[in-house]
Image (cartoon, helix red, strand yellow):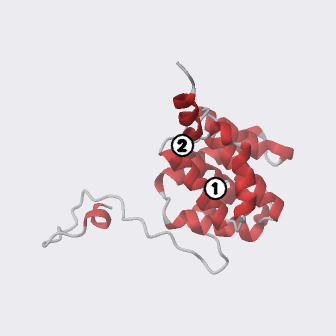
Amino acid sequence: MFDRFFGKGDQPAAPSSSDIAPRPAPTPVDPAGDTATVRRIVGKLEAMPPEQARFVASAAYILARAANADFEISDQETAVMETALQRDDALDEATAILVVEMAKLQAKTVGGTEDYVVTREFKSLATEDQRLNVLRTCFLIEAADGSITAAESAVADEIANELDIDSATLATMRAEFADQMSAIQQMRRLASPS
């Protein structure tokens, strides 16, 4: 793993007998469009039809991605994610908790290209209303602590772009959360008399 980040030295060390874990393979994308991240979550949801499990897994990952925008997923953000996955009896509470925990782990450890690939997969499975609901839930998650930071706002913009949500719709949705935007909160604090 360190080789991937720092490059190999001039003299690669020979593997020792204490090297017990093989290096994980890069996250593959199979021809059906599944990513390794989605497959891991889907494996826990085998009781569902495969398309529904892929839909839930990819939606959960997007929500976790939004929650992890500031590199920390709070209890409040987790609660919003769990509630969202239980909406309309989509998942029972125990399954929602499991899916959220798995998605959080994946969002914290995978990221990067996987973010785009999973969001693209969700887009291929979702209706326009479902894509809008996921984006709105991303904003709800980011606002769970009372403030949406610039980093969180940027991730919401990326998700909207990857879900092909037009800028006018995004602006309307963003306006719903204007009071939670940290930049607006800061401007109001500066403008208010002491």
Q: Does residue 81 appear anywhere in the picture?
A: no
Three-letter residue code for mark 2: Thr
Counting from the top left corner in percent of width and height, residue 17 is at 23, 60
The residue pinned by badge 1 equals 62
Three-letter residue code for mark 1: Ile
* 105 vs 12: above or below: above
In percent of the image, x 64 and y 65: which residue is there?
161
Counting from the top left corner in percent of width and height, residue 45 is at 72, 55
Lateral position of residue 43 relative to residue 169, left or right: left
The residue pinned by badge 2 equals 149
- For label 1, the crowd category at 10 Å Cα-Cα, with few meaning under 14, some 14 to 19 and many 20 or more, is many
Counting from the top left corner in percent of width and height, residue 60 is at 67, 52
In depth, the one of 5 and 145 nearer the eye is 145
Counting from the top left corner in percent of width and height, residue 189 is at 55, 29
Labelled disc at residue 86: none
Circle 2 sits in a helix, a strand or a loop, which is it?
loop
- For label 2, the crowd category at 10 Å Cα-Cα, with few meaning under 14, some 14 to 19 and many 20 or more, is some
Lateral position of residue 6 relative to residue 109, left or right: left
* 7 vs 135: above or below: below
Residue 140: name its quadrant: top right
**Residue lying furthest left:** 11
* 152 vs 170: above or below: above
Q: Does residue 141 appear anywhere in the picture?
A: yes
Closer mark to the observer between disc 1 and disc 2: 2
The quarter of the picture where the N terminus appears is: bottom left
